[in-house]
Image: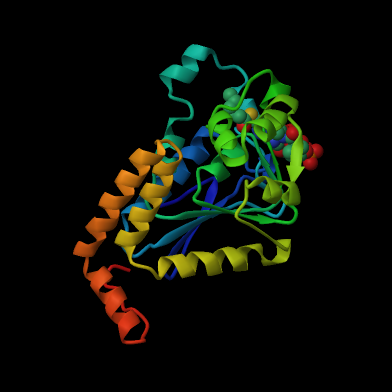
């Protein structure tokens, strides 16, 4: 398949998606959303893929939703075309997704990173929700996921001032999983993705599902879900293999990976 706004690559069991609109700092337009969702959905359905990396350029992960595309729209347009609807499908992928962020991750770019399971940041990364500077508010989940990620006071600071925070502040705030030197970002992302992709797929799918549930259920509900999902994995060959391999002091040979 030919894509205009992204580069796609498969290396072993890892699917790579590189946002590629350098002329617009990878601003997320409708075309890019459809292309990302299309390839991510295909990776998600492919048992040969155990992890997905989403990245941008050195200068920008993504500088937000495409302002020029949105500028003239009415509220009705936004509703009728479900302007950001595809991103909900991206956020619901069961394959682990790693965002590898260098440079700007602003507005929709920060929100896209927060739809991923793991956020690796280069020391050059800059995160922010600058929508208030445009007379709007975050529209791809930022007002909700950022509060859950960094707490209400840091989130309000970012959403109300529209300022950017650097990688160190993002790490202190709990927005990123790890910070690495910019030159190591893709190597590190590839290593993390390969480490994940070597596990058994049913356990990865189970893990992303319960981790996602933790963002939106009560503790009691979440613990009930965890107990059921945990039990269900004892009906997989890979659980038998994983535990036998431990006992026999050898590497596990998972079938579903
Ligand atoms: C469309 C964008 C863009 C964006 C940058 N560009 N961000 N185009 N949408 N979000 C374009 C610029 O217009 C310019 O193209 C080119 O990319 C390079 O950007 P410059 O501004 O020249 O670069 P620089 O001076 O280095 O400044 C970088 C920047 C700035 C600080 C990141 O570009 C910026 O502030 N961008 C907007 C960030 C933002 O507000 N994001 C939130 C969007 S709203 P031309 O051809 O003009 O030279 C959002 C929320 C969605 O994401 C929900 C709301 C409803």
Task: Please say if 140 is above or below 214.
Answer: above
Res 252 quadrant in image: bottom left
Residue 8, can we see it?
yes
Q: Residue at x 70, y 49 (%)?
A: 172
Residue 240: percent from the left, percent from the top? 24, 73
Q: Residue at x 48, y 16 (%)?
A: 77
Q: Residue at x 74, y 47 (%)?
A: 169
| Camera-side residue of 238 and 61 | 238
Res 21 quadrant in image: top right
Residue 78: percent from the left, percent from the top? 49, 19
Residue 148: percent from the left, percent from the top? 55, 37
Q: What quarter of the picture does the C terminus occupy?
A: bottom left
Q: Residue at x 60, y 27 (%)?
A: 138
Residue 1: percent from the left, percent from the top? 40, 52
Q: Locate residue 43 relative to residue 122 in the image: left or right.
A: left
Q: Locate residue 52 relative to residue 184 in the image: left or right.
A: left
Residue 13, can we see it?
no
Which quadrant of the frame does ligand 1 lie within?
top right
Q: Locate residue 142 relative to residue 215 in the image: left or right.
A: right
Task: Please say if 255 is above or below 210.
Answer: below
Res 187 quadrant in image: bottom right
Task: Please say if 176 is above or below 73.
Answer: below
| Camera-side residue of 148 and 135 | 148
Residue positioned most to the front: 220
């Amino acid at each position: 398949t030919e894509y205009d706004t992204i580069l796609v690559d498969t290396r072993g069991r890892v699917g790579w998606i590189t946002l590629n609109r350098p002329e617009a700092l990878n601003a997320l337009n409708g075309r890019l959303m459809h292309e990302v969702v299309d390839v991510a959905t295909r990776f998600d359905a492919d048992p040969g893929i155990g992890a997905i990396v989403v990245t941008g350029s050195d200068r920008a992960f993504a500088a937000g939703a495409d302002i020029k595309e949105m500028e003239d729209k009415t509220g009705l347009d936004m509703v009728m075309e479900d302007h950001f609807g595809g991103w909900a499908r991206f956020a619901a992928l069961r394959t682990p997704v790693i965002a590898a962020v260098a440079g700007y991750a602003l507005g929709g770019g920060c929100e896209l990173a927060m739809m991923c399971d793991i956020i690796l940041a280069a020391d050059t990364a800059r995160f922010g929700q600058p929508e208030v500077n445009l007379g709007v508010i975050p529209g791809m989940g930022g007002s909700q996921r950022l509060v859950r990620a960094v707490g209400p006071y840091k989130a309000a600071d970012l959403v109300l001032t529209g300022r950017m925070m650097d990688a160190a502040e993002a790490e202190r705030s709990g927005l990123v999983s790890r910070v690495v030197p910019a030159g190591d970002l893709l190597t590190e992302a590839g290593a993390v993705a390969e480490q994940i992709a070597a596990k058994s797929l049913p356990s990865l799918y189970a893990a992303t599902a319960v981790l996602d549930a933790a963002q939106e259920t009560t503790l009691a509900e979440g613990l009930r879900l965890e107990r059921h999902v945990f039990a269900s994995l004892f009906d997989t060959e890979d659980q038998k293999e994983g535990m036998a391999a431990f006992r026999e002091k050898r590497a596990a040979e998972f079938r579903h990976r």
